[in-house]
Amino acid sequence: MGVDLAPTGVVPPFRPGTGVVYFGDTDHYFGWLCVVPYYGTATGTVTVNGRKRSFTGHGYHDRN
């Protein structure tokens, strides 16, 4: 099984401030970057048992 995915943003990436939110001290934090926000596009292939299928659709990608 394999997936080959190519997301493309239709609006700029988003990062709130530095992308890091601290909870009281610097030992406790949450980081977030929205690389492909809103409705980006996604194209690629999915391969299962040697059979490859192409797809196109909406995509979203963020990192925590």
Image (cartoon, rainbow, N blue to C red):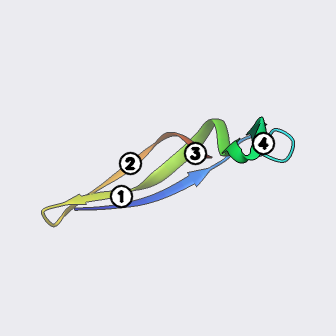
The answer to the question of whether label 2 and label 1 lie on touching residues, with beta carbons closer than 8 A, is: yes
Q: Is residue 8 left or right of residue 11?
A: left
Closer to the camera: disc 2 or disc 3? 3
Q: Quadrant of residue 46?
A: bottom left
Residue carrying label 4: 25
Point out residue 42 in the picture as x, y percentages from the top left corner. 51, 47
N-term-proximal mark, 2 vs 1: 1
Tell me the kind of residue under disc 2: Phe
Please name whichever residue, 1 or 18, is drawn nearer the observer in this view of the structure.
Answer: 18
Between the C-alphas of marks 1 and 3, the distance is: 17 Å
* Crowding near the residue tagged with mark 4, few <14, some 14–19, many ≥20 C-alpha atoms within 10 Å: few
Residue carrying label 3: 61
The answer to the question of whether label 4 and label 2 lie on touching residues, with beta carbons closer than 8 A, is: no
The answer to the question of whether label 1 and label 3 lie on touching residues, with beta carbons closer than 8 A, is: no
Between the C-alphas of marks 4 and 2, the distance is: 45 Å
Residue drawn where x is 78% and y is 45% of the image? 19
Please name whichever residue, 9 or 29, is drawn nearer the observer in this view of the structure.
Answer: 29
N-term-proximal mark, 4 vs 1: 4
Point out residue 26 in the picture as x, y percentages from the top left corner. 77, 48
Residue 31 appears in the picture as rendered: no
Residue drawn where x is 79% and y is 44% of the image? 12
Point out residue 3 in the picture as x, y percentages from the top left corner. 34, 59
Element at label 2: strand
N-term-proximal mark, 1 vs 3: 1
Residue carrying label 1: 45
What is the residue that sits farthest to the right in this orientation? 17
Closer to the camera: disc 1 or disc 3? 3
Residue carrying label 2: 55
Between the C-alphas of marks 4 and 1, the distance is: 44 Å
Between the C-alphas of marks 2 and 3, the distance is: 17 Å
Residue 43 appears in the picture as rendered: yes
